[in-house]
Amino acid sequence: MKLLGIFLIIAGIAMFIIRSFSYTQEKNVVNLGPVEINKRENKTVTWPLYAAGIVTLAGVGVLLMAKKD
């Protein structure tokens, strides 16, 4: 349980520092035998600050509960 708490705290702090990340997704638009047309889309994943706070507090809570045992 301590390891889970530490992981959640680190993940929450990382979410505070890194607010979003981007990736490229390639979609097949047309496939006519030997002819292919592909489309690349840039996607961005973001999360609010309160989500980072919730994850950090959950990690602290798990860590405190693990110390009681």
Image: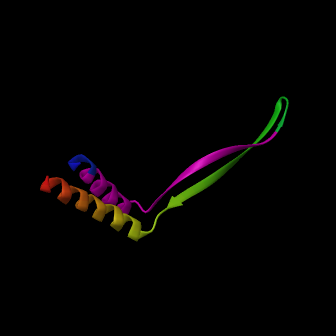
Residue 10 among those drawn in magenta: yes
Nearest the viewer among 10 and 41 is 10
Residue pictured at 43% horizontal, 63% vertical:
19
| Left or right: 61, with 47 as reference point | left
Residue 64 lies in quadrant = bottom left
Magenta span of residues: 5-30
- Residue that extends furthest to the top in the rendered view of this protein: 34
- Residue 50 image offset from top left, x and y in percent: 39, 70
Please report the residue visible at 23 percent of the width from the left and 61 percent of the height from the top: 60
Above/below status of 25 relative to 58: above
In the rendered view, tell whether residue 54 sits above or below residue 33: below
**Drawn side of residue 8 relative to residue 29, left or right:** left
Question: In the picture, residue 38 is in which quadrant?
Answer: top right
Residue at image coords 34%, 61%: 55
Q: Position of residue 4 (x, y in %)?
A: 27, 49
Q: Is residue 19 magenta?
A: yes
Tell me how many marks there are. Answer: 0
